[in-house]
């Protein structure tokens, strides 16, 4: 009910709310949070006397009455109901989740590949794709060079490798 006895919708954004910092301020509900911030800055002495409700920041209550307000705040019941419903939904979802994922078939055999690779020696600077390793294979791989014709790769590096020079000592 408003001051004239008319029924007022609590969710109506156009309803007027009295400012807790200045009783002459009547603010539309949709603008009330912004107004609270502005008036709190303009009235720091009154702001020190008021406490903010933990369930609804629009509720500014005298510090002496905050514990009574917290126990009877209408928004407290909404938040508690919401928390209970969320926890019930989460527990139900956790119990109903069953993974239907199946790993794809795998035709790799790492042990076989390791045995095949151990038969060929590693030589620095050469390329071995494993194509010619099998007897009876008619595929021949040529070594390709990305250098222009008439150019060749150097046979030695322009610097000495520290690990190589220590190995000879």
Image (spheres, rainbow, N blue to C red):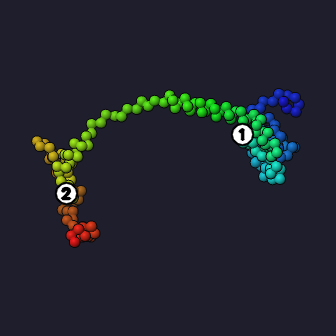
Residue placed under numbered mark 1 in the picture: 55
Image: 67 above or below 169: above
Q: Residue furthest bottom?
A: 169
Residue at 72% from the left image edge and 42% from the top image edge: 54
Residue 35 relative to residue 100: left or right: right
Residue placed under numbered mark 2 in the picture: 123
Residue at 24% from the left image edge and 56% from the top image edge: 146
Q: Nearer the viewer, residue 135 or 141?
A: 135
Residue at 67% from the left image edge and 31% from the top image edge: 81
Task: Give the percent coordinates (x, y) of residue 84.
Answer: 63, 32
Q: Quadrant of residue 105?
A: top left
Task: Give the percent coordinates (x, y) of residue 46.
Answer: 83, 50
Residue at 37% from the left image edge and 32% from the top image edge: 102
Residue 101 relative to residue 149: left or right: right
Task: Give the percent coordinates (x, y) of residue 155.
Answer: 19, 65
Q: Is residue 158 visible?
A: no
**Quadrant of the snapshot with the N terminus:** top right
Q: Residue furthest right?
A: 4
Residue 126 relative to residue 13: left or right: left
């Amino acid at each position: 009910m408003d001051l004239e006895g008319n029924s007022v919708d609590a969710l109506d954004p156009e309803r007027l709310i009295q400012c807790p910092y200045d009783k002459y301020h009547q603010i539309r509900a949709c603008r009330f949070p912004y107004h609270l911030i502005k008036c709190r800055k303009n009235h720091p002495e009154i702001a020190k006397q008021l406490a903010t409700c933990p369930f609804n920041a629009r509720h500014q209550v005298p510090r002496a009455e905050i514990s009574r307000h917290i126990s009877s705040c209408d928004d407290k019941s909404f938040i508690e109901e919401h928390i209970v419903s969320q926890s019930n939904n989460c527990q139900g979802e956790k119990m109903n989740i069953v993974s239907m994922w199946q790993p794809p078939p795998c035709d790799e055999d790492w042990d076989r590949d390791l045995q095949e690779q151990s038969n060929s020696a590693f030589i620095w600077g050469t390329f071995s794709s494993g194509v010619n390793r099998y007897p009876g294979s008619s595929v021949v791989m040529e070594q390709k060079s990305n250098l222009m014709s008439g150019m060749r790769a150097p046979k030695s590096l322009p610097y000495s490798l520290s690990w190589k020079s220590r190995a000879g000592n």
